[in-house]
Image (tube, rainbow, N blue to C red):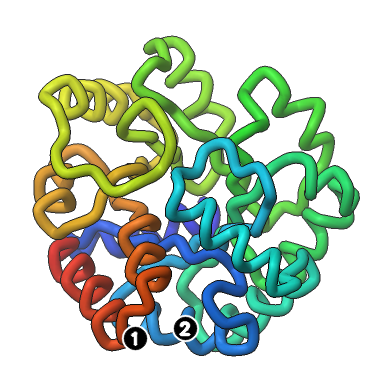
Amino acid sequence: MSYIANFIEELNKKNRKALSIFLTAGFSEKNKFVDLAKNVLDAGADMIELGIPFSDPLADGPVIQASSKAALDNGVNLKDVFTYAESISAYSNKPITLMGYANPIRKYGIKNFLNDAANCGVKGLIVPDVPLEEYDSFFTEQPDNLDVILLTTPTSSDERIQMIDSKSEGFVYCVSVVGTTGVKNNFSSNTIDNLQRTYSLLKKNKMLIGFGISKPEDVKNFSPFCDGVIVGSRIMKSLLNGDKLADTLKIVSELSCACD
């Protein structure tokens, strides 16, 4: 079993759902980012998803796009992302995943990227613009200790979900709604039905739900049919707004409590 899968399994054995917090690497202050990530972990996050800043993040809504642009404007690059990951992994054994897009990874060199990610303590990788059909041609080889995590969407057929489950490692990332990331005020009954359907089809992997989850009530509503949740825009919005760090960490803490 992979490090991430085993970590989630141990949480679930304690009747806890995993809480993964997305942070745009290097935002909002390049030189203080590691401290931010440490604080988020201490506030109750079980995992950190480090977003690699990119100029055209197609799966991300306006909040994460804005944070990504700000990080790029501050000069954050892939070397910085790996340095952050190394420092965070030295601080905590909680899993770190990277979320990034194909173009920067290709430019860096896929093999070099995967090796450097694994060597700095990253346990998983999410590349939303590499679909199932292109997986084998993109990931021709990868380190044994680095999981490539695939995504399902509300439009995925039963057969496709099962294929994604077979290919994915670590967990399956279930996108809750059609569209980009961002805070949602409510979810339709169709959303709930689709999440239940997806969860019932997975035989190999744990399932974490992302996109739109912003408050403890969302976590409670989704808990019966997932093994954890991923929250990004709610946290990044707080940072973008310039909220006090204590207020941002309170959001993390409240979400964490809802996972128990």
Question: Which comes before the other along the chain, label 1 or label 2?
Answer: 2
Quick check: can you spot residue 208?
Answer: no
What secondary structure is marked by label 1? Answer: helix
Left or right: 83 with respect to 23? Answer: right
Residue at image point 79% right, 49% down = 104
How would you rate the neighbour count of disc 1 (Cα within 10 Å): few for under 14, some for 14-19, many for 20 or more?
A: few
Out of 70 and 219, give the one closest to the viewer: 70
Residue at image point 76% right, 53% down = 143
**Residues marked 1 and 2 touching at CB (< 8 Å):** yes
Residue at image point 25% right, 42% down = 226
Out of 133 and 200, give the one closest to the viewer: 133
The three-letter amino acid code for the residue at tag 1 is Leu
Left or right: 236 with respect to 69? Answer: left
Q: Position of residue 21 (x, y in %)?
A: 39, 63
Residue 151 numbered tag: none
Left or right: 132 with respect to 208? Answer: right
Q: Position of residue 17 (x, y in %)?
A: 24, 57
For the C terminus, which image quadrant? bottom left
Between marks 1 and 2, how big is the CA–CA gap? 8 Å
Residue 36 numbered tag: 2
Which residue in the protein does label 1 denote? 245
What secondary structure is marked by label 2? Answer: helix
How would you rate the neighbour count of disc 2 (Cα within 10 Å): few for under 14, some for 14-19, many for 20 or more?
A: some
Out of 1 and 172, give the one closest to the viewer: 172
Left or right: 127 with respect to 207? Answer: right
Q: Position of residue 144 (x, y in %)?
A: 71, 52
Where on the picture, by quarter, is residue 255?
bottom left
The three-letter amino acid code for the residue at tag 2 is Leu
Q: Position of residue 46 (x, y in %)?
A: 36, 69
